[in-house]
Amino acid sequence: MSDTRQHVHELIDRLDSGQLAAVGQLLEVMVHAEEEDEVISAEEEAAVARSKEWFKNNEGIPFEQVVTELGFTMDQIRNASDPKAQDPAA
């Protein structure tokens, strides 16, 4: 066994159950990340090419304008992940 592998095993042996579970999840993500790489289809590649071509001849739409047209405010967007910011009564 390599020195690095042995050292990692020694560290793992010192973890409590919660830490061990967290490390286990991290290792799962690391090991399976390559397996889960998304394959881009020919259709998706064509859509990206059309998008790039469109932007060569057209200006983009400012994000703030899109937000407004959808009926939101920038404060709502900024606080979207904060439930207390969305519901002041919370």
Image (cartoon, rainbow, N blue to C red):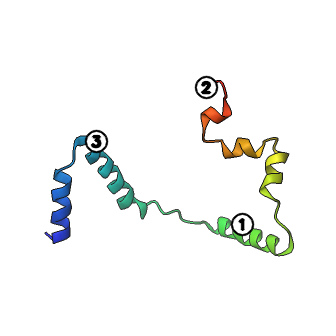
Name the foreground residue: 52 vs 7: 7
Q: Position of residue 48 (x, y in %)?
A: 70, 68
Does 8 sit above or below residue 86? below
Task: Look at the numbered discs 2 and 3 and tell me whether their residues touch, using CB distance below 8 Å.
Answer: no
Image quarter of residue 50: bottom right
Q: Earlier in the sequence, mark 1 or mark 2?
A: 1
Whole-percent x and y of residue 56? 81, 75
**For residue 36, above or below residue 86:** below
Q: Are marks 1 and 2 in contact (CB under 8 Å)?
A: no
Count neighbours of disc 1 (C-alpha within 10 A) and say few if under 14, some if 14 to 19, many if 20 or more: few
* Quadrant in which residue 26 is drawn: bottom left
**Residue at the spot 70% in from the left edge and 45% down from the top edge:** 77
Q: Position of residue 10 (x, y in %)?
A: 15, 58
Q: Which residue is mark 1?
A: 47
Amino acid on which disc 2 is placed: Ala
Specify whether 33 is left or right of 18. right
Residue located 24% across and 41% down the image: 17
Dot 3 falls on a residue whose secondary structure is: helix
Which mark is drawn over residue 90?
2
Which of pointers 1 and 2 indicates the residue nearer the eye?
2
Instruction: Judge left or right: residue 52 versus residue 27.
Output: right
Q: Mark 3 sits on what residue?
A: 18
